[in-house]
Image: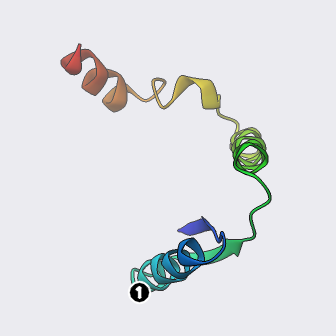
Amino acid sequence: MRCFVLEGEGRVAERAHGAAGALRELGCEVKLVSTVHPVVDVVRFQLLTIDLAAARGVDPDLIRRDDPRWERARAAYE
């Protein structure tokens, strides 16, 4: 599994590094990403999501509703 962690500054950066260490212990490949601005950072991850979905041939807007297991879980919740 690959994880991206926003680094931030000051105390936030310390926590980000701690989170990255914990994720590595779980076997995740971790990339610390420097932050620019909260809005800009969110947009970068949205674009990443779109690119990954396109590469996998899935529609990211369905939020797994095309998977019968997730559809049943959603129906059970409603």
What is the three-letter code of the residue carrying label 1? Answer: Glu
The quadrant where residue 35 appears = bottom right
Location of the C terminus by quadrant is top left
Residue drawn at the location 66% of the way across and 73% of the way down: 9
Residue drawn at the location 51% of the way across and 30% of the way down: 63
Q: Is residue 33 left or right of residue 76?
A: right
The image position of residue 39, as x and y in percent, is 73, 42
Q: Is residue 17 left or right of residue 25?
A: right
The image position of residue 77, as x and y in percent, is 21, 20
Specify few, some or many for label 1: CA neighbours under 10 Å numbering under 14, 14-19, or 20 or more.
Answer: few
Report helix, strand or loop for mark 1: helix
Q: Is residue 42 left or right of residue 25?
A: right
Q: Is residue 23 left or right of residue 76?
A: right
The image position of residue 13, as x and y in percent, is 59, 77
Residue drawn at the location 61% of the way across and 78% of the way down: 10
The quadrant where residue 29 appears = bottom right
